[in-house]
Image (tube, helix red, strand yellow):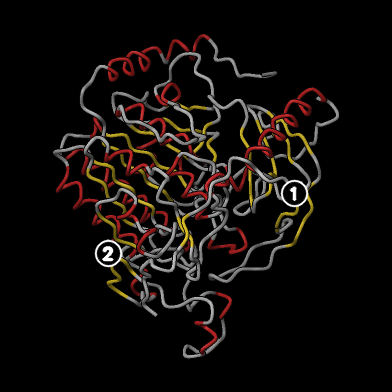
Amino acid sequence: MYYRRILNAATASMLLLACALAASFAKSETPPNIVLIFIDDMGYADIGPFGARDFPTPNIDRLAEEGRRFTDFAVSAPVCSASRAALLTGTIHIRLGITGAYSPQAKEGIHEREMTLAELCKQKGYATAIYGKWHLGHHPKFLPLNHGFDEYHGIPYSNDMWPWHPRYHGLAPDDPKRREVYPDLPLIENDRVIDADVTAEDQKDATQWATDRALDFIDRKHKKPFFLYLPYSMVHVPLFASDAFLGKSGAGLLGDVIMELDDSVGKVVDKLHEYEIADNTLVIFTSDNGPWVSYGDHAGSAGPYREAKGTSFEGGIRVPTIFWWPGKIPANTNCDEFASTIDILPTVAKLMGGKTPNHKIDGKDIGSLLFGEPGALSPHETFPHYYQRQLQAVRNERWKLVFSHKYRSLNGREGGTGGLPVDYDQNLASLALYDLDNDPGETKNVINQYPEIYAELLDAAEEYRQDLGDRLTKTRGSGVREPGKLGPNDRRLIWY
């Protein structure tokens, strides 16, 4: 590899204690609890530890002060279902055959052969629960209880997939066009619809629904190992905050919503301390992709990074991430090495002594990065960025090669207001090489200055194409698996 970041001696010395703590844990017989908090559409700069200043996030700030910020942490895809599939399986989404965001009309979902984080945890007798947004198939065979979770409460897909989607703005409430694409939004408990028509008033309480159930789950399960997955439906539009948080931020509805999420994080962490299990619990806070900027004042910020959700530029795929484990992970430190959501499953497997699946996954153990071991480097020699079955970019620790492709952009225009979006422009990206260390905003094409880097990443891209395919070059990948399919004898979850 042409370039690898070298830790200086001062940093290495500071992290020696963390290394010793990691070694100490390796001898422990008690596997850690896992709490995975997954925010929807949160931009890189939407919380205090990563740049937000218009509203406070004291509980997430505390998480960062007591934990480790990952500043170069990427999702597999800048879109809902694909990103979640990769997170839960440790596998690049394109290999799973899941490439976009499933609609209520979808007859696909996560395949039963794929091992989820919940199924990994069940190997060691963990209690498992998910409260929030699933979005990996809404029919029973795809729902969480068939993929390792003991409990589920939440919505099956995005909260805008309902008759009140902005595309129907101005239509009468009873206009039949409202339900041509999106039926009423259901609320599911385990594998049963308990409310076939989630209203706007209901959605105001969605964050609290998830948090209250999370606290109850810890009350009931704290004496044994547990995996708690909290994929909140916010800050995906339409935005909703409970009455207790409306107007609290002074920075608009988005600020109110994030402050409510921050409060929820604090309650979960406080509950861990209440039962004196914080020192044996790994809390992971991250997001599924960048902000949905066409919604303007209802969208977050990617900070210094280019573009946003739905693109393979850094604003779409680099997400704010914190790992917290008191006494194990070095407090108030940064990790600037590249890592990804697909690394969480193999890392957890190593921590608990679990076995990863026999079939291929793409994630790597990043325990050395978590614990701040001296000289620890990203385990990824290269990493691909796929969107809409296209290989749009490939990177290593420092360099990113972007291939010519179409992408959406506001081109500097303001987004919408009050929950209504503006239309994107369609741009054409040029073939370009970016030095992410010195040009994180991907503004300066240096492809002509570094032909050897270009050639190296081009070779890596061809290997990805042979394995995972590429619609841009019409390459069929040999390593792509099929998603789960709804067969003729499978029971369907019908509420409309």
Q: Please tell me whether residue 467 is drawn above or below residue 97 in the rendered image.
A: above
Give the x, y percent position of residue 153. 29, 60
217 left or right of 141 in image: left
Residue sitting at 79 percent across and 53 percent down?
428
78 left or right of 235 in image: right
Give the x, y percent position of residue 413. 71, 60
Instruction: Provide the residue designation for mark 1.
Output: 474
Label 2 residue SS: strand
Residue sitting at 27 percent across and 72 percent down?
194
User: CA–CA distance between discs 1 and 2?
Assistant: 42 Å
Give the x, y percent position of residue 470. 69, 46
Query: In which image quadrant can residue 394 be found?
Result: top right
Dot 1 or dot 2: first in sequence order is 2
Q: Please tell me whether residue 52 is drawn above or below residue 419 in the rendered image.
A: above
Q: Quadrant of the N terminus?
A: top right
Sort mark 2 into few (<14), some (14-19) or many (20+) by Cα contacts within 10 Å: some
Sort mark 1 into few (<14), some (14-19) or many (20+) by Cα contacts within 10 Å: few
Query: In which image quadrant can residue 258 be found?
Result: bottom left
The amino acid beneath tag 1 is Lys
Q: Nearer the viewer, residue 27 or 267?
A: 27
Label 1 residue SS: loop
Residue sitting at 77 percent across and 56 percent down?
427
Q: Nearer the viewer, mark 1 or mark 2?
A: 1
Q: Nearer the viewer, residue 281 or 269?
A: 281
Instruction: Provide the residue designation for mark 2.
Output: 189
Q: Please tell me whether residue 267 is drawn above or below residue 349 in the rendered image.
A: below
Give the x, y percent position of residue 465. 69, 39
Q: Quadrant of the C terminus?
A: bottom left
